Image: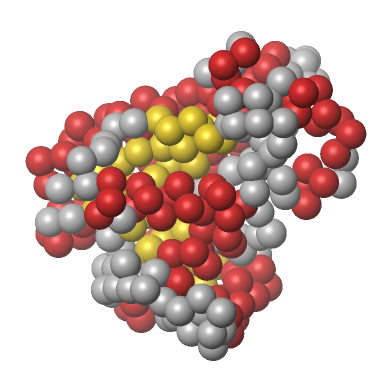
């Protein structure tokens, strides 16, 4: 267990499900941050290797409980089975972070109907389904915090180059508000984070392509995955106990110039 940053226990006794938690981007940073606050973390990923690697990392670096949930989010039968196995180990989920997403870019003539369907299925419909499958227990517990990881693309028409992604994220904003309205009377909060550019290995390998976006960002840099994780922690914790139905822009001010 790492001794560099002791667990303060802000989320002690909570169980968090983080989708797409096994990769090298925001998901793994979010999973580790919630674990450092004492939450048991269910790491969902379609890759067994990545899910188990993230679990081992959390256990080694943080010393918190973590279990894998290996399933494709669009395969509901497999997801239900994997989630049931994980919950049997951790207890009922009362924190959900819908982080997993896919994207296709180009003109509307560049991607197929199947591409469009795949993006909507992962980036919007799967978010609804994960919420649907966990919110019942949250109602029984009388508490719950849901954070949907969205994008400023949901405001900007996907920038004209990623219509499926932009459409999915715009829909995710309204899903967030709808869940907040329905969950509020049961002490279940739902918020979203609209991300700008985040410095991940995906961005770093083609960093020159993103310099125009950097020039339009008032802070003149990209977010780090740890910064994103801190916003998620705030939104799932009691520090934001009267915040629900909000879309929090984490873009370094990018939207100010649009």
Q: Quadrant of residue 108?
A: top right
As drawn, is 119 to the left or to the right of 201? left
Q: Which of 175 and 126 is in front in this view?
A: 175
Image coordinates for residue 100, horizontal then vertical, percent? 56, 48
Q: Residue at x 26, y 38 (%)?
A: 243
Q: Which of 49 and 63 is in front in this view?
A: 63
Quadrant into which the N terminus falls: bottom right
Q: Quadrant of residue 110?
A: top right
Q: Residue at x 20, y 59 (%)?
A: 137
Quadrant into which the C terminus falls: top right
Q: Is residue 172 above or below residue 149?
A: above
As drawn, is 154 to the left or to the right of 148? right
Image coordinates for residue 184, horizontal then vertical, percent? 16, 39
**Looking at this rendering, what residue extends furthest in the bottom direction?**
1
Q: Nearer the viewer, residue 246 or 178?
A: 246
Q: Residue at x 41, y 55 (%)?
A: 233
Q: Is residue 138 above or below residue 231?
A: below
| Residue 250 seen in the current view | yes
Image coordinates for residue 204, horizontal then vertical, percent? 82, 46
Q: Is residue 152 above or below residue 118?
A: above
As drawn, is 138 to the left or to the right of 245? left
Q: How many labels does the image show?
A: 0
Q: Quadrant of residue 125?
A: top left
As drawn, is 177 to the left or to the right of 5? left
Q: Is residue 241 above or below residue 52?
A: above
Q: Which residue is drawn at 45% across and 47% down?
A: 231
| Residue 75 seen in the current view | no
Image coordinates for residue 35, horizontal then vertical, percent? 45, 71
């Amino acid at each position: 267990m790492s001794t560099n940053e002791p667990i303060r226990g802000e989320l002690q006794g909570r169980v968090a499900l983080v989708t797409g938690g096994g990769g090298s981007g925001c998901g793994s940073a979010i999973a580790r941050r919630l674990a450092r606050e004492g939450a048991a973390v269910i790491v969902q990923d379609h890759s067994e290797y990545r899910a188990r690697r993230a679990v081992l990392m959390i256990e080694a670096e943080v010393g918190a409980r973590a279990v894998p949930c290996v399933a494709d989010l669009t395969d509901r039968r497999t997801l239900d089975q994997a989630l049931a196995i994980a919950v049997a180990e951790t207890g009922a989920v009362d924190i959900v972070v819908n982080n997993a997403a896919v994207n296709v870019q180009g003109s509307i003539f560049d991607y197929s109907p199947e591409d469009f369907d795949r993006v909507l299925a992962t980036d919007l419909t799967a978010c609804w389904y994960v919420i649907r499958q966990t919110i019942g227990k949250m109602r029984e517990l009388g508490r719950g915090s849901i954070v949907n990881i969205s994008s400023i693309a949901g405001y900007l028409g996907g920038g004209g180059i990623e219509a499926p992604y932009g459409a999915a994220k715009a829909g995710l904003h309204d899903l967030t508000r709808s869940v907040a309205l329905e969950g509020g009377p049961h002490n279940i909060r739902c918020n979203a984070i609209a991300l700008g550019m985040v410095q991940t290995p995906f961005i770093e390998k083609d960093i020159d392509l993103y310099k125009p976006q950097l020039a339009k960002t008032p802070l003149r840099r990209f977010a780090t995955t740890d910064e994103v994780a801190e916003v998620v922690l705030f939104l799932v914790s009691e520090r934001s106990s009267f915040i629900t139905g909000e879309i929090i822009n984490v873009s370094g001010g990018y939207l100010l110039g649009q």
